[in-house]
Amino acid sequence: MGQREHVRVAVIGSGFGGLGAAVRLRREGITDFVVLERAGSVGGTWRDNSYPGCACDVPSHLYSFSFAPNPDWPRTFSGQEHIRAYLERVADTFRLRSHIRLDHEVLMMRWDGDELRWEIETSKGTMTADVVVSATGPLSDPKTPEIPGLADFAGKVFHSSRWDHDYDLRGKRVAMIGTGASAIQIVPAIQPQAAKLTLFQRTPPWVLPRMDRKITGVERWLHRQLPFTGSARRGLLWGIRELQVSAFTKRPNELGLIESLAKANIAKSIKDPALRARLTPSYRIGCKRILLSSDYYPALAQPNVDIVASGLSEVRGSTVVAADGTETEVDAIIFGTGFHVTDLPIAERVVGADGITLAESWKDGMQSLRGATAAGFPNWMTIIGANTGLGNSSMILMIESQLNYMADYMRRLTVLGGRAALAARPSAVGAWNRRVQERMERTVWKSGGCNSWYLDANGRNTTLWPGTTGEFRRETRRVDLTEYEVVRVLAKSAAAAESVDVAS
């Protein structure tokens, strides 16, 4: 039987996080790595989410890598097809294709404490790696609620991230479940086609106009010929959002003006006072993600749209029943019900040094050191880990900060030499997370009076970062070795690894 393939680094996922990690590894001079992707192409969430109207709610020039600027974004807020094409170009430009293994779903990862390496079982075979960088992302595994009778529904059912493009919605009676970021894009896109569109709304979102427009040819020419103009545009967009952070994290009452603008946005399109009341949230703006759309409310005002101010509770044949008892006959059910964010499925496939899964380790909530490493899981890192999400800016900024941390982590391992691993100290993980949660108490996400997908089953916000992106960049610039134990294999025949206390 042949020897299993071994690599220095295995990256899991080929979205922004995975491709960014691959680029950074190459820039660090590390070429012995693979990118394991379960699908047949790169792109992550921007490959999977191809529903009608799918676009980013972060400006294009801020939603791209700083090391791979794109002067040719066609719109100020780019659509899914343009972002996916951008990621394909990144894979080509930085010569990543030879490292990418498509259709390689990771089934299990186990830490071998004797050899100090990860054993990785994929759908195409097994391999080992010194370091694993998990970049599967929090918006990759759709969450569909368990609804009584749904299995017996004779019509069409799918989640927004698994859109069935072969199913024609024209003339159909459609139920849209949920009112999150996907739903407010889907509703205006499919409303003109559907004979009847019924929106099931448990909680109304706050929605502001989306100031989207075509980027002119002159602007694109300028960014190509004078790249600093694109950098300046990106810097301005970043700076504006950094100034907004304190209202979310320290002074939620300052969001009152924004809330007034959002109410005016409702009133502009919704003339019926009763409907307007149903669409006006009762919680402080910012408690849930503020959504951007200029055509959501106009679509809801159309005569072929009904809003049910309640969640879906049951399906009886072709009848969908809301929690308030409202019954509606439909031909198709579309779930815009989000993703497994605080209960990441990948965590069930990672077995650490103590023989327990990451999911078991996180049973009381996700905890990671600087959003990157977890106690009990040596040489394992995550991109977009616990408390690295943002409520008002671009996740690419956070990803690049974590790539800085990953790069320094790899440098530290190189300096240590030989067979070595870094294991996050439980005390360091605990101290970091206590600090994050203490800061979280002042934020609108804790005091805004809503129950959002930011919160886990225990009501803790394990998703968002309670500060600026600049703060996070400083916190992840370098690896502090006092927060880790260095684990070594002293000799190839050693029966066990030796832990070295680097803090002494």
Image (cartoon, rainbow, N blue to C red):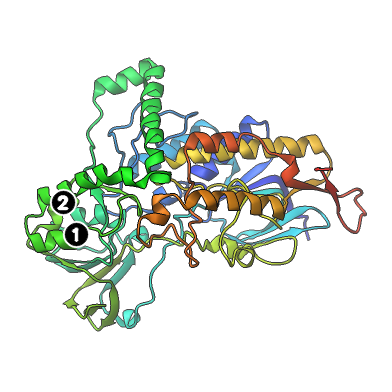
Q: Position of residue 303 (x, y in %)?
A: 7, 62
The residue sitting at 65% across, 35% down in the picture is 478
The quadrant in which the N terminus is found is bottom right
Kind of residue indicated by mark 1:
Leu
Q: Position of residue 33 (x, y in %)?
A: 66, 43
Q: Is residue 94 left or right of residue 221?
A: right
Q: Is residue 156 left or right of residue 190?
A: right
Q: Position of residue 212 (x, y in %)?
A: 23, 37
Q: Is residue 168 left or right of residue 99?
A: left
The residue sitting at 34% across, 82% down in the picture is 148
What label sits on residue 279 in the rendered view? 1
The quadrant in which the C terminus is found is top right
Residue placed most toward the observer, 433 or 67: 433
Residue 430 position by quadrant? bottom right
Residue 157 position by quadrant? bottom left
Q: CA distance from mark 2 to mark 1?
A: 8 Å
Residue 355 in view of the camera: yes
Q: Residues within 10 Å of mark 2 (few under 14, many from 20)?
A: many
Give above or below for 473 relative to 126.
above
Query: Would you name the residue on which mark 2 appears?
Result: 266
Give above or below for 174 relative to 86.
below
Q: Is residue 439 left or right of residue 212?
A: right
Query: Helix, strand or loop at disc 2?
Result: helix
Q: Position of residue 199 (x, y in %)?
A: 21, 65
Among numbered discs 2 and 1, the one appearing first in the sequence: 2
Residue placed most toward the observer, 479 or 320: 479
Kind of residue indicated by mark 2:
Ile
